[in-house]
Image (cartoon, rainbow, N blue to C red):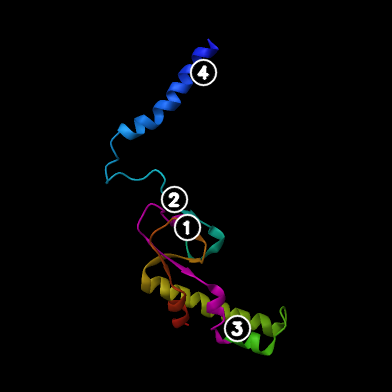
Amino acid sequence: MIRLAILLTSLLLLAAPLAQAVMPAAAPDEVSVNQEEVKLDRDKVRHGNASKFDAKGTSKVATVRSTDVYDEIPAYKTIQKEGVEKGSARYNQLIREATKAYKAALKKVAKDGSYVLIVEEGGISGYSHVTDATADIIAAL
């Protein structure tokens, strides 16, 4: 009985490559099973509502390099230039100003570009409708 099972398994293993060679190729309009799945890191969403994002849709998504944007904001430049101590009243005031400018620029670019989400670079993968909007966000400051 064991020999029969081994013999049948061997035959199946030998027949598998032959069956693949004989079978017709998939039709071009069929979707590949190996397509990468969309992954969204909700912690990296900077603008928009991640729970309303449809990964199977065609909504536009933008990415941003927030550090590049902050480096261009006058209030943040002041923190860097003057070496303002983190946690001080002056630091808190300037960082609030910088964050307000950052959020306003994100909102403007999202509206102008019809983006449903703006995500930190590396926060989304496997989605084809993604654009780097960092330069546009800097321009909107």
Residue 36, disc: 2
State the image coordinates of residue 25 (x, y, percent, origin top left): 29, 39
Amino acid found under the numbered disc labelled 1: Ser
| Mark 3: secondary structure | helix
Q: Nearer the viewer, residue 40 or 11?
A: 11
Q: Are marks 4 and 2 in contact (CB under 8 Å)?
A: no
Residue range in magenta is: 50-74
- How many angstroms separate mark 3 from mark 2 (CA)? 38 Å
- The residue beneath circle 1 is 125
Residue 6, disc: 4
Amino acid found under the numbered disc labelled 2: Glu
- How many angstroms separate mark 2 from mark 1 (CA)? 8 Å
Q: Nearer the viewer, residue 125 or 12?
A: 12
- The residue beneath circle 3 is 76
Front disc: 4 or 2:
4
Residue 57, disc: none
